[in-house]
Amino acid sequence: MENTTLQVGTKALIYNKSHQFLLIKRSEKYGYLAGQWDIPGGRIRPGTDLLTNLAREVKEETNLVIYDQPILLTAQDIITKTNRHIVRLTYLAQARGEISIQDEEVTEYQWCSQLEVAKLNNLDSYIKEVFDKMPQSLYHLLQSEYVKR
């Protein structure tokens, strides 16, 4: 498609030792996405590697610091009606620190089990797709030594 803008974004599916995932609620800054539950992340800055961008976005939105090597879960193509093609890369990650949300982008947060996530009505559709397609092997990984570090 001519005149299509390509954007790349990174997202972090952060989990804790209780096998819960961190969800954030988007603010009014996000227009039609305001009030939807999402996971931390955003657009990359050209010239900066993916994981540096991921760490920056997580820190900006939650004040958490990613540790260990995040695992790439999925890549999604999001093609909009406004001539944008967004490639969204979602990583499984662990993070440390005290959560402190930035009101400009995030209004609240919660830790949810996979079952609780499935019951949310206002979950970002692309994050829902990540959870729906999450391989069973991932749940075994979450119970492995990787989580206990």
Image: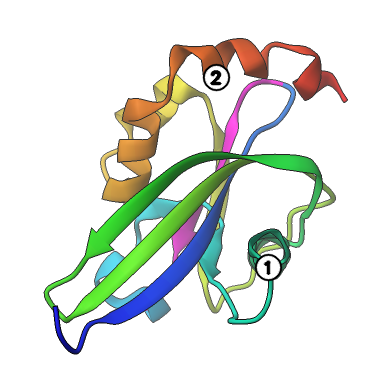
The residue drawn where x is 74% and y is 23% is 17
Q: Is residue 8 left or right of residue 101?
A: left
**Alpha-carbon neighbours of circle 1 within 10 Å: few (<14), some, or many (≥20)?**
few
Q: Position of residue 144 (x, y in %)?
A: 73, 12
In this picture, which residue range is highlighted in magenta? 18-28
Residue 67 on the magenta segment: no
Query: Is residue 103 shown above or below 113?
Result: below
**Alpha-carbon neighbours of circle 2 within 10 Å: few (<14), some, or many (≥20)?**
few
Classify the position of the N terminus by image quarter: bottom left
The residue drawn where x is 65% and y is 81% is 47
Labels 2 and 1 touching (C-beta < 8 A): no
Decide if residue 27 is in sight here.
Answer: no
Mark 1: which secondary structure?
Answer: loop
Q: Position of residue 58 (x, y in %)?
A: 67, 60
Mark 2: which secondary structure?
Answer: helix
Question: In terms of sequence position, does the residue under pointer 2 or pointer 1 come before the other?
Answer: 1
Q: Position of residue 42 (x, y in %)?
A: 52, 68
Comparing 48 with 99, the one in front is: 48
Residue 23 on the magenta segment: yes
Q: Amino acid at mark 2?
A: Leu
Q: Amino acid at mark 1?
A: Asp
**Which residue in the rendered view is the most extreme toward the bottom?**
3
Query: Is residue 103 shown above or below 35?
Result: below
The residue drawn where x is 68% and y is 11% is 143
Q: How was this image coloured?
A: rainbow
Query: Where does label 1 land, which residue?
Result: 49
Q: Is residue 52 left or right of residue 108?
A: right
Q: Residue 138 got which mark?
A: 2
